[in-house]
Amino acid sequence: MPAIIITENHDLANKVIESLKTCYDPEIPVDIWELGLIYEININTENDVAIKMTLTSPSCPVAETLPPETEQKIREIDGVNSAKIEITFDPPWEKSMMSEVAQLELGFM
């Protein structure tokens, strides 16, 4: 399930995606973008970035640290006015949401 990207600022969206690719669950050697944890990126005309993401499970050990760390990395991007992460479990994450890159890295292909 690829992320929905809502913006007219494609340069900033690409910077956000590149930043997301630097965020990792410490237990999984694949970034959160390739894992399919990002459901939606919405960047408004003021360059406020809202991201809807999930975790591999509701009891994920990094539930308290990964979203704020990700939010901070997005805030640090040149041109971003503000950043907000919303966690959702609808739909629940499943392995099929991973990119082929992630599936290969984790030995699922």
Image (cartoon, rainbow, N blue to C red):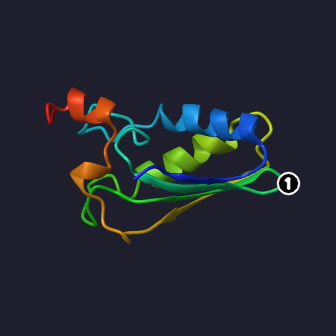
Characterize the local packing of mark 1: few (<14), some (14-19) or many (20 or more) Cα atoms within 10 angstroms: few
Q: Position of residue 88 (x, y in %)?
A: 43, 68
Q: Residue at x 67, y 41 (%)?
A: 13
Residue at left offset 50%, top offset 51%: 3
Q: Is residue 109 above or below residue 98?
A: above
Answer with the quarter of the image where residue 92 lies.
bottom left
Where does residue 47 sit, x and y in percent of width and height? 79, 50
Viewer-nearest residue: 82 or 109: 109
* Image location (x, y in percent) of residue 89: 36, 69
Residue occupying image coordinates x 51% and y 38%: 20
- Is 102 situated above or below 60? above
The quadrant of the rendering that contains the C terminus is: top left
Quadrant of res 64: bottom left
Q: Nearer the viewer, residue 66 or 93?
A: 93
With 103 as the anchor, is 19 left or right in this view? right
- Relative to 58, does residue 30 appear above or below in the rendering? above
Residue most extreme to the bottom: 90
Q: Which residue is mark 1?
A: 46
Describe the element under mark 1 as helix, strand or loop: loop
The tally of labels here is: 1
Callout 1 amino acid? Glu
In the image, is 20 to the left or to the right of 55? right
Left or right: 39 with respect to 95?
right
Residue 103, image x and y in percent?
Answer: 23, 35
Seen at 60% across and 45% down, the residue is: 72
Q: In front here: 31 or 25?
A: 31
